[in-house]
Image (tube, rainbow, N blue to C red):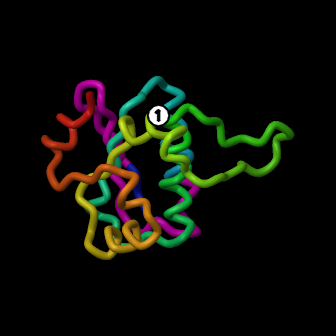
């Protein structure tokens, strides 16, 4: 898997290429955290070249949403990151700041099955996606 970044005004686009699975999901989380720590607050995940997302990949998307909702993923004692379900009320700001672009049909179907398709806004073209950030 490869991750590249581009900037479009205030929106950072993370272009992900390859499967997001148990061997790559931490790369997605790490890069999203890095970009957030550098000051980015609007993130568009370009999934055009992502043919497959495993349960670990779903956890990566969940983690990115938590980061951009302003929640730390680190455990106070320095252990493994803590995870919890997305709370639509508490995490609504993540919907405004993390969006998806160009989902492949198989990936879209997986997101719909687990309910993340309802949580994330998804766009088919870059211009509309960039314009959707307020």
User: Is 103 left or right of 20, judged from the image as shown?
Assistant: left
Highlighted magenta segment, given as a residue range = 4-27
Query: In terms of secondary structure, where does tag 1 sit?
Result: helix
Nearer to us in this view, 86 or 53: 86
User: Is 85 left or right of 13, judged from the image as shown?
Assistant: right
From the top left corner, tell me how far across and down residue 56 is, in percent: 56, 66
Residue at which label 1 appears = 35
Q: Residue furthest right?
A: 77
Identify which residue is drawn at 44% across, 64% down.
Answer: 115
From the top left corner, tell me how far across and down residue 86 is, in percent: 55, 50
Identify which residue is drawn at 71% across, 49% down.
Answer: 81
Q: Quadrant of residue 75?
A: top right
From the top left corner, tell me how far across and down residue 111 is, in percent: 40, 66
Which quadrant does the C terminus fall into?
top left
Identify which residue is drawn at 66% across, 42% down.
Answer: 73
Nearer to us in this view, 20 or 89: 89
| Residue 120 sits above or below residue 117 on the image | above
Which quadrant does the N terminus fall into?
bottom left
Q: Per the image, is 63 magenta?
A: no
């Amino acid at each position: 898997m490869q991750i590249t970044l581009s900037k479009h005004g205030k929106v950072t686009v993370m272009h992900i290429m390859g499967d997001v699975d148990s061997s790559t999901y931490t790369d997605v989380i790490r890069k999203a955290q890095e970009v957030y720590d550098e000051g980015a607050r609007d993130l568009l995940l370009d999934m055009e070249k992502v043919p497959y997302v495993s349960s670990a990949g779903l956890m990566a998307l969940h983690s990115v949403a938590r980061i951009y909702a302003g929640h730390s993923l680190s455990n106070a004692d320095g252990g493994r990151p803590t995870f919890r379900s997305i709370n639509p009320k508490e995490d609504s700001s993540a919907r405004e700041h993390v969006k998806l672009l160009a989902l492949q049909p198989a990936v879209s179907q997986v997101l719909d099955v687990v309910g993340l398709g309802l949580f994330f806004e998804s766009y088919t073209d870059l211009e509309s996606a960039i314009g959707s950030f307020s």
